């Protein structure tokens, strides 16, 4: 039994190019389409709490794509230990023979596939891609900036974070990639100047308000992974002409950005369009230039499977990774 081990640095090195990210975006788009058409077997993630530590197990399988399991955790106590708060691995197996194929660094894989999912929404829903706002300046914000700058002709990025030092660091990354970057002091100032807004925060309270929005913009929200947490207020939900999600079942069970407005009667399940339905042409992502569009994602296991398969093949083609025999 031969197994390819791929570390986080190798994931970054393999993907950080125009061809690398465009291939990943296409793989994630195909995975969303397959999920919404029912060809993917993907149970809801299993969540276990050990005291206050969160553990998640995310399996997924599809014929001719593979079978994967991601094990991921959030350990807040690791801050005091000098360790990452979120860590994980993805195990990839052949769906025909059952043979284990690879173990891939789950932290890097998750960051890239999450950014690629946002890029899919931009590709299929956004009106323009020149001015981008990122709210948040952590790991996910950094990978979004890196991937989007490879995939799209971004002219300017506005950055807002509660931690200004991190925002300045993110701006430096943008500038090193030839993008004009501006750090702003308020979410309002960041949003009012953007055609695309990405929220990548750990906030439990809204960081975007509907009163800030303007016609034609696209919003991608990847935070608020808990039932009582929100990145978007009710007015954002009201003003969105289209609310696209990675999975209806997932968002209705996992994020307050959808659960709370549904409880308040603002929206119902029929208002939620899966991004896979837009990709397949069953539903529209944008019908008018002036529409405000929204993509809300919580991250689903089919993204991990698609990313793992793509990374595995890419890494092998570049003779990267370490093969071990079990």
Image: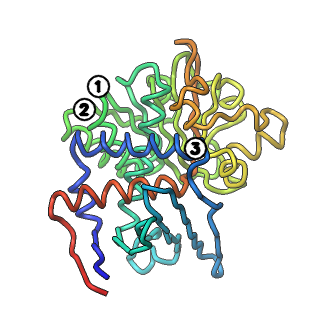
Category of crowding for the residue at label 3, using alpha-carbon neighbours closer than 10 angstroms: few (below 14), some (14–19), many (at least 20): many
**Where is 107 relative to 20, above or below?**
below
Nearest to N terminus: mark 1 or mark 3: 1
Of tags 1 and 3, which is closer to the observer? 3
Of tags 3 and 2, which is closer to the observer? 3
Q: Which residue does the image show at 55% across and 20% down from the upper left?
A: 286
Indicate left or right for 9 with 245 as reference: left
Indicate left or right for 97 with 58 as reference: left
Asked if the residues shown at circle 1 and circle 2 are in contact, with their CB atoms under 8 angstroms apart, the answer is yes
Residue 6, position in %: x, y?
A: 28, 69
Q: Nearer the viewer, residue 135 or 252?
A: 252
Tell me the distance, in whole angstroms, between the alpha carbons under discs 3 and 2: 29 Å
The circle on residue 246 is 3
> Residue 283 occupies which quadrant of the picture?
top right
Indicate left or right for 264 with 32 as reference: right
Task: Say which element carries label 3.
Answer: loop
Nearest to N terminus: mark 1 or mark 2: 1
**Where is 117 relative to 40, above or below?**
above
Q: Which residue does the image show at 69% across and 49% down from the upper left?
A: 249
Tell me the distance, in whole angstroms, between the alpha carbons under discs 1 and 3: 27 Å
Tell me the distance, in whole angstroms, between the alpha carbons under discs 1 and 2: 6 Å
Q: Nearer the viewer, residue 60 or 73?
A: 60
How many numbered marks, from 0 up?
Answer: 3
Category of crowding for the residue at label 1, using alpha-carbon neighbours closer than 10 angstroms: few (below 14), some (14–19), many (at least 20): some
Q: Which residue does the image show at 42% across and 71% down from the upper left?
A: 97
Pointer 2: what residue? 179
Q: Quadrant of the C terminus?
A: bottom left
Pointer 1: what residue? 155
């Amino acid at each position: 039994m031969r197994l390819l081990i791929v570390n986080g640095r190798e994931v970054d090195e393999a993907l950080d190019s125009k061809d690398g990210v465009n291939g990943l975006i296409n793989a994630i788009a195909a995975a969303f389409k397959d999920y919404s058409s029912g060809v993917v077997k993907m149970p809801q993630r299993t969540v276990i709490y050990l005291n206050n530590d969160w553990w998640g197990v995310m399996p997924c399988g599809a014929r001719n794509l593979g079978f994967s399991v991601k094990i991921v955790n959030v350990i807040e106590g690791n801050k005091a230990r000098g360790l990452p708060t979120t860590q994980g691995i993805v195990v990839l197996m052949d769906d025909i023979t059952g043979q284990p194929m690879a173990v891939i660094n789950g932290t890097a894989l998750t960051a890239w596939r999450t950014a690629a999912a946002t890029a899919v929404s931009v590709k299929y829903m956004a009106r323009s891609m020149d001015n981008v706002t990122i709210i948040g300046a952590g790991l996910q914000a950094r990978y979004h900036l890196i991937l989007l700058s490879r995939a799209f002709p971004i002219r300017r990025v506005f950055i807002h974070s509660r931690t200004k030092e991190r925002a300045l660091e993110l701006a430096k990354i943008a500038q090193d990639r030839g993008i004009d970057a501006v750090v702003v002091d308020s979410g309002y100032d960041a949003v009012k100047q953007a055609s695309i807004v990405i929220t990548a925060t750990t906030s439990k309270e809204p960081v975007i308000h509907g009163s800030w929005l303007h016609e034609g913009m696209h919003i991608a929200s990847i935070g608020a992974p808990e039932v009582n947490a929100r990145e978007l207020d009710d007015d954002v939900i009201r003003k969105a002409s289209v609310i696209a999600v990675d999975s209806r079942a997932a968002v209705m069970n996992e994020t307050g950005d959808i659960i709370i407005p549904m409880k308040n009667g603002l929206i119902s399940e029929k208002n939620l369009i899966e991004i896979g339905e837009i990709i397949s042409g069953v539903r529209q992502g944008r019908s008018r230039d002036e529409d405000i569009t929204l993509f809300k994602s919580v991250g689903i296991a089919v993204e991990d499977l698609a990313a793992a398969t793509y990374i595995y093949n890419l890494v092998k083609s570049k003779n990267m990774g370490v093969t071990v025999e079990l």
